[in-house]
Amino acid sequence: MSLLTTLQQLRASERHHAQPLSRLRYLHVADQPMLILPLNRPGETARPLAVMAGCDPGHPRLFLAPPGDDDRFLTDLAEHLHTYIHSFHYATRIRPAKGEQPERREYLDAPQLVVTGTASAYYLKMLGRALRYRPVPEGTDPATSVSHLGCWLTFFAERAEYATSSLLLNLTGLLSTHWATGQSILDNAHLAPLMAWIFPPPGLTGHQAALAAENPLQHPPDGPTVDPSFESARLSSLFAALKSSRGVRRQHHVARLQEAAEDYLQPTWDLAWKAIATLRGLPPVRSTAARWDTDIRRFTAYSDHLAAGGPPQPKHDDVVSAAIRLAELEHAAASLAASRALEDDFVMAERRTTGEAFRGTVTHTEPDRTIPPQGPRQRPKRRPLITVRTNDPVRLEPNRLLAGPHDPAVHMAVLDLTYTTDDTEIVLEVRTRTSNPSSVPAVGTTLLLTTAPDHFRRPQFPSRDQIPWTHTDTGLTAPGHEPGEDQA
Amino acid sequence: MNEPSAAELSRRAVAHILTTLTTTSHRGVVVDSPPGAGKTTLVVHAAQHLTRPQHPCMIVAQTNAQVDDLVSRLTQDAPHLTVARLSGQSYRAPDRLQAGPNLIITTDARQAAAADVAVATASKWANVQDWHRRWAIVDEAYQMRSDNLLQIAHLADQALFVGDPGQLDPFSTIPTQPWKGLAHDPMASAVSILLKMNPQLPVLSLPVSWRLPASAAPLISAAFYTTPFRAGTTDTERRLTFAHPGLHGGAVEQTVDLAARTGWALHELPARHTRRIDPEAAHAAISIAQRLLIREATAYCEDHPTGQPLEPGHIAIGTAHRDQAGYLQHLLRTDPRLKGIDVDTANRLQGREYAVTIVLHPLSGRRDTSGFHLEAGRLCVLTSRHRHACIVVARAGIDRLLDDHPFNEPVHLNADAKFPDGWEAHQHVLHHLTGHRIRA
């Protein structure tokens, strides 16, 4: 945890009110996202009791899975989610050909799911895993099947692992990047106490409001795990009654279970929409739109995959997909961190305390410097030099590429660092946009610099039929086939 | 019957490895090398051995500094070989590497085709096309990530993997571990995946550490390694003496004296919870370095039997976190006498060697432990860089901290249990250090 975040947390606990961390939003918040509040059946794994979902704050829909009647629940939920997803399949645009990429059709917008926290996001992943291999019944449309529901849930949950993706928003995660509270990270993972810190009711401090919100009878904690007090007070007797009843009596108990689930989820539902509106109200940083564009492309690609009858996501990544996904995940995290630093003053300030960024004055420039040719067939290259003096604590090593918010496209490499007792002198070599005169700032200019965002170069991996011996199981089992998987 | 000498043991092990290379029917050979066991020497020998019957080979290292070290050793020890140093676009060769008839420095693999030995980092090799060699030597293979090996394994038919299994595992910046327990986890080290997929491969080891003194080798071997090793030197060969006696009574003086006498010292500050940067501990480390230099220490060893004055360049200060290292560097710059002392994190000290190391204990001043701070490899790197003495600076109470926080990381299906266990290795080292404690 960084110094500034710690400071704001200490301030929050001293002043009993949440303190702002960053006032700029870096993920997209859709105009009409679908909020999903799953509730799991006590004592079981990935077995839903109810799901409250919908795009309209005033009209939540509750899907109930009373004991002994799971299938209706799943088809209803699948239909609801598919209607939402398919509503994005009407409007398309054409992305013109660029470089080696041919012209492509793309959807104009993409669906966005919202959950309250990491636990719910993980729950959707587990549910997707449980459903995506279900067979599609004869004579039904696969596009509305439970199996496709599993595929879509898996798609959203997997995209949520990428730091740059907004397809599945995690409310508590996002709120805690914007506000520091006086409670622990574990407490911040629950929506009610977190929102209480940020928006306490009139007359209460954030601290007092959070203490009140911890009472599970007044503010049932968000799912997917149900609170034990709710289980013993209402669920246990209803479950027992449902077990022994048939016909009209059963209908009566199902209605009461529905009521109980609605009572439990309604406060979280209202609070979650308030959180969504709050996040939507934060001004976005510039690169947010570009990141959402990438999400739309991913959504288009996966829609095409399913429409073409593609198979559900495999149980495990194979050796090549795992390596590629790791490279993509790492790049997503690094590129988000770099672009946030360049676009958000708070993140830049945070980086200055850790030595990854600094503010300094240009003391000397050599705009016309060239370096001798590197190879026999090359010409001398233009590489302007800039010397910057700073008294920030700097922790950089030579060859690191830097950029600043003044012009993020100009990348400069650290050539040399000289430390004196009070400040540090850094010699930088301009590496991009070298012929543009504005790339070399005038002597006396104040610069803010941090690590430059890196372009993603997809690493070269062997094709799946040419996995080298080092990564092939030479034992008795055939490649890509794990022992015990047949029985699964 | 007399036990064979360390030199004899070492020579036999290397000869056995080289014979295995030429006779093996397996596609790979793994050599485990404890700290300072002559890994680079083995790589140079193996390169000469493999190229002798007119077969050029390739060497893969992990960082540019490691490649430069290997190239300079190869050009010195095997002047009859032509060596090619392949590099990326932004690389600038250090002054000690001068291109000549026996050394080609190039970014283009085609220009390296004629060389007997071509050396580059794993990430450079990943971009090389149309290349094939019979043998590849992979240096520091335990620091290499599995996905890195996947990119370059097709470049050679057979490969020798050399590395130190006790050092830090490769790491990733992303928090989730979706592939934990899979046979091909791309985040795991190259050797662990290689051996999981090819369990029949021969695993050999080097039995003697020439770096660690006799006071350290048994502890490091027992705490961190499955295959035991011994020190190459005896107690009497390695000595540290001072030209000036210590001032009366100070804890820093006592720490320095104890370390010179026994090879270990634990400089224990009063118990206190601190932030990552603990100014008192940092200042203690600086004072220890100052006293070592002001009292004009002399180090006697097998290479310098008549003694070598201890200079700042022979001292390193090791930390767990980069901001701690940054703070210490800042403090060092205030005293010109200390110029030349290396301060770095465990990750960056891997593969380096010093006469004396001063270590900020990873658990010092902490309220809790974490997988990061308990990692056995981190402690192993920090406590195995020295030829003469290792001085650990820590807050009191680490024993209680360890007792309060037993290992509680989640267990993943199919994931191998990690050896050595970090918690146990910490207990082992701490138990030893308690016998060398000076309370400040």
Image (cartoon, coloured by chain):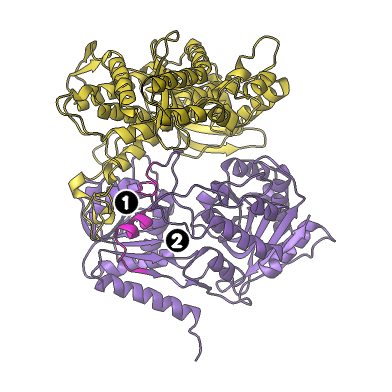
Chain colours: A yellow, B purple
Specify the amino acid type for callout 2: Asp
The spot of residue B231 in percent (x, y) is: 54, 73
Q: Main secondary structure of the magenta part?
A: loop
Q: On the image, numbered disc 1 is attached to which residue?
A: B149
Give the answer, above or below, for where A466 lies relative to A421.
below
Depth check, front residue: A375 or B439: B439
For residue A125, side relative to residue B130 (left or right): right
Q: CA distance from mark 1 to mark 2?
A: 17 Å
* Residue A440 in sight here: no
Under circle 1, the secondary element is: helix
Q: Are marks 1 and 2 in contact (CB under 8 Å)?
A: no
| Residue extent of the magenta highlight | B178-203
* Residue B355 in sight here: yes
For residue A312, side relative to residue A205 (left or right): left
Q: Residue at x 37, y 44 (%)?
A: B179
Disc on res. B164: 2
Farthest residue toward the right? B248
The spot of residue A473 in percent (x, y) is: 26, 56
Chain under numbered label 1: B
- Both labels 1 and 2 in a single chain: yes
Chain under numbered label 2: B
- How many numbered tags mark residues here? 2
